[in-house]
Image (cartoon, helix red, strand yellow):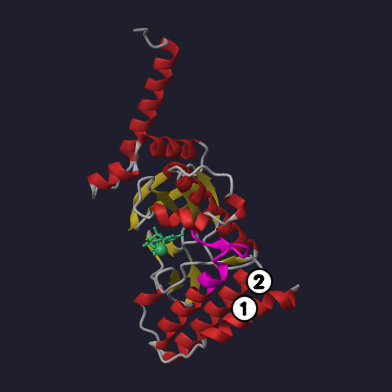
Amino acid sequence: MKDFDPAISKKVYKIDKKVDEFRKRIKDSEDLKLKDEVFDTSTLMALYKLSSKGYLDALGGTVSTGKEANIFHALRVQDDENQELAIKIYRINNSNFKAMQEYLIGDVRFKNIRHTKKDIVLAWTRKEFRNLSRAIESGLNVPKPIITQRNILIMEFKGTDNIPYPQLREFNLTKEQATHICSEVKDFMLRLFRDAELVHGDLSEYNILLEPESLTPVFIDMGQSVTLDHLNARDFLLRDITNVAHFFAKYGVEMDVESTLEKIVKSRVDHQ
Ligand SMILES: Nc1ncnc2c1ncn2[C@@H]1O[C@H](COP(=O)(O)OP(=O)(O)OP(=O)(O)O)[C@@H](O)[C@H]1O
Ligand SMILES: [Mg+2]
């Protein structure tokens, strides 16, 4: 058998060493199995690339372990100041991959991707980046996306001192506060539809964070958001509205699903 080209062996060795160094820098050691699942060598390489390009300086602990992704806290030092970041790492081997495929089919932006697990997850990561960018361009309160690399999305951290803002479901609101937040959520759905031309697709009290002092809602988790030409866009919008109405009903805040849907859909016609 032919020996490896020594130049290539050397290169591979070098990369291995760098990956090892990065592995050591990952301080979070709570769950070794999970760590292995998330930080495979390609993901470590991608993280290494991002750090060598200056996008992150220190990776911190786990913020959340979701169905398809893990969120980590990270820091970037800029002008002697620590900027907090959220790093979302989609697992290539995640259980939701079939569902992901359904959201991608019908999105013209991703019609040419191959349907392997890896390609779907990588497209999904870019999709979340683009969806967040569109929402930001429309002036909506979502985490500002910074960059993607492979299955990694780096974005603004919505929280303070390593702690994310709590989810809407965790608050005990007065009816007055709930009424106000409900109208802000309706406004978000309308502007996302009218201006960003997107439907969130998984809007609920889990994917809305609240800035605790001002109770300003922050909308997260936009990997599954679809453009309006998606065949199921209207159904997804109806489902989002229904989830929101169901949640606020607990506070006695009434929200009519049909008329909200009509108002949102009509806002675009009026706008054109
Ligand atoms: N930009 C961010 N800033 C701060 N915290 C964040 C950010 N993005 C996500 N989080 C935290 O991570 C949690 C999960 O995020 P997200 O919903 O995007 O991931 P997910 O994998 O879809 O999770 P799930 O399967 O639980 O829905 C959020 O509830 C929040 O606590
Ligand atoms: Mg979520």
Residue 81 appears in the figure:
no
* Residue in the image at 51% along x and 61% along y: 143
Q: Residue furthest front?
A: 231
> 199 or 148, which is in the foreground?
199
Asked whether the residues under the numbered discs 1 and 2 touch, taking CB atoms below 8 Å apart as contact, a structural biologist would say yes
Circle 2 sits in a helix, a strand or a loop, which is it? Answer: helix
The magenta segment: 223-237
Q: Position of residue 215 (x, y in %)?
A: 47, 78
Amino acid type at circle 1 is Ile
In the image, the residue with mark 1 has its CB under 8 Å from the nearest atom of ligand 2: no
Q: Position of residue 179 (x, y in %)?
A: 49, 88
Is residue 225 shown in magenta? yes
Q: Circle 1 sits on which residue?
A: 264
* Residue in the image at 76% along x and 72% along y: 272
Q: Circle 2 sits on which residue?
A: 194
Q: Position of residue 158 (x, y in %)?
A: 46, 63
> 221 or 172, which is in the foreground?
221
Circle 1 sits in a helix, a strand or a loop, which is it? Answer: helix
